Image (cartoon, rainbow, N blue to C red):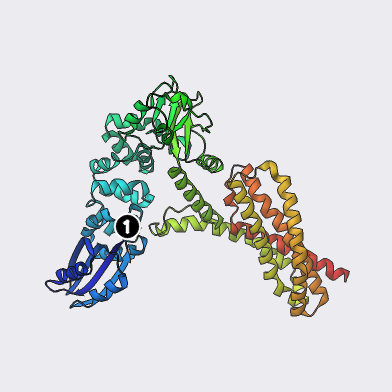
Amino acid sequence: MRYVIYVEGVDRPGLLRDVSDVISRYEGNILYSVGYGSEGIGYILFIVEYEGSPEYLERVISGVRGVHKVDIAELGPDAVDIISGFIRGNPSVASGIAPYMHPEDFIMVLVRLDDDVRRKIYGTLPTNVLSLILPELPKELLDEVSEVLPPKTLVNALMKLEPDDLVDVLQDLNPSVRRVAIKLLPKEKIEEIRPLLAYPPETAGGLMTTSVPKYRADATIAEVLNDLGKGKYEISDIIYVVDNEDKLLGYVTVPSLFKASPNTKLERLLRRDYVAVEPMTDQEEVAKLMIKFDMTRIPVVDTDGKLLGVVTIDDVTDVLLAEESEDMLLFGGVMRVEHYLTARVKDLFKKRFVWLIFLYLVENITARIVSSYSDIISKVAILAAFMPMILDTGGNAGSQSAVLVTRALALGELTIRDVLRVLSKELLTSLLLSITIAPIAFLFAYGVSFNVTVSIAVALAVLLVIMSCSVIGGLLPLFASALKIDPAVISAPLLTTIADIIGLTIYFVTLSTVLKII
């Protein structure tokens, strides 16, 4: 296993050598080491291969003269804080550490550094490291990189990317930087990515790779294997078969090629049970299809059936993670944030302020409802004690329904045509829930108020609130979907606010009715 070892001690000659000797003595293979001193303190970082106990290694290193602090963590996410702290003190060492880290882990290090420190690092990174992190960088960091690096350095890193990744990065760059980068790219690279640039990034055409092995039906297995052996395609486990006009005929799995004679033509092995999408198909729809049919690849064809490219499972995984993250933010009443640690405070303010002020204005309705029934509350003050319970119960019931329906919509299990099924299911479910919870609410209310009339009113209100909020929570995502609005916009704060209004109205109307009758 690989570990990161951070050592802090007295800045003396031979400290690095002495610690290195101890690590080597206990069968640690030092892959990288670097140190620097400041104000009498020496700081050292090692990346080592070691199969023993890290706790034991920590103890023996602590015994080296002058050492007063040792931290050991497995190279990966657990070591991010150690590495970021070390780089913060000496940014120039980042270029030596980065090649040993997974790109995602190194990005985690970058986001934990101040922007002035990051800007010192970008220009020192090797081109191959830049090419690995560029497709994964949050928008804020990508903007920083494009501002700091000379255009030619940026383009050299872009040249190492696969066509689909290259296009993704170009589309995320600021327009002025994008124009300069495209001008500096070789003509053959421009021609390679031109088809991808024609489609929005959130579509199948924007996601697909054009580095796809495709052959005519009369090609022999020997010819195909010879071409695949050159390693020039991003996809290597499946090949696609097209006709003379590049229209997709089907596919052949690579393992099946080794089971047939080298002179066998592809048409003998051709499988036609494929699912394809058009280039303007939304990325979420692509993801749903791949999940539904358990596919790792899905071809993209135009209206004439010509093969344009292929969307891979890696691209879909990124889509699902991005969509889930965005839905979580929307469901929490927050607009999309690319990366929290790198987000500017003013941007966070803008993304949260709109929702908060909107919800505050809507909540004024609840205040008006309460004030309009102030006479009842003043006569029976204990009624106010049950308001939080009524409101929370309604909000929770509505949120449960909304989450279930939103998930079903995301998985393609529901459409707007299922509105009556959802309505009936929520009515029956909420009825069972309410008649189960209402007696509990009655007992709780009576234990607090010792008033049968009040307890009956509270129990009836709970029953009606659960039913109404469950139905509304289940139907709102459907209506949002029908209006081409992301169902996640029916966020928890918005739904809770609506439930508050409904709950208070039902509560006080029920109270008024019961008090008049009894």
Residue at point 26% right, 65% down?
86
How packed is label 1: few (under 14 Cα within 10 Å), some, or many (20 or more)?
Answer: many
Which residue is farthest left?
A: 13
- Residue 263, placed above or below residue 19: above
Question: Viewer-proximal residue, 490 or 229?
Answer: 229
Residue sitting nearer the eye, 195 or 223: 223
Counting from the top left corner in percent of width and height, residue 375 is at: 77, 72
Q: Quadrant of the C terminus?
A: bottom right
Q: Circle 1 sits on which residue?
A: 110
**Residue 55, percent from left and from top:** 31, 73
Does residue 452 appear left or right of residue 188 in this picture?
right
Residue 343 position, x and y percent, is 40, 57
The answer to whether residue 337 is above or below residue 251 is: below
Residue 27: x %, y % from top left: 23, 66
Residue closest to the far top: 244
- Residue 56 seen: yes
Q: How many marks?
A: 1
Give, as a three-letter code, the residue at label 1.
Leu
Up/down of 375 relative to 162, above or below: below
Q: Secondary structure at mark 1?
A: helix
Vertical order, 52 against 178 (above or below): below
Q: Is residue 226 left or right of residue 32?
A: right
Q: Which residue does the image show at 30% across and 49% down from the upper left? A: 145
- Could you say which is closer to the camera, residue 323 or residue 35? 35
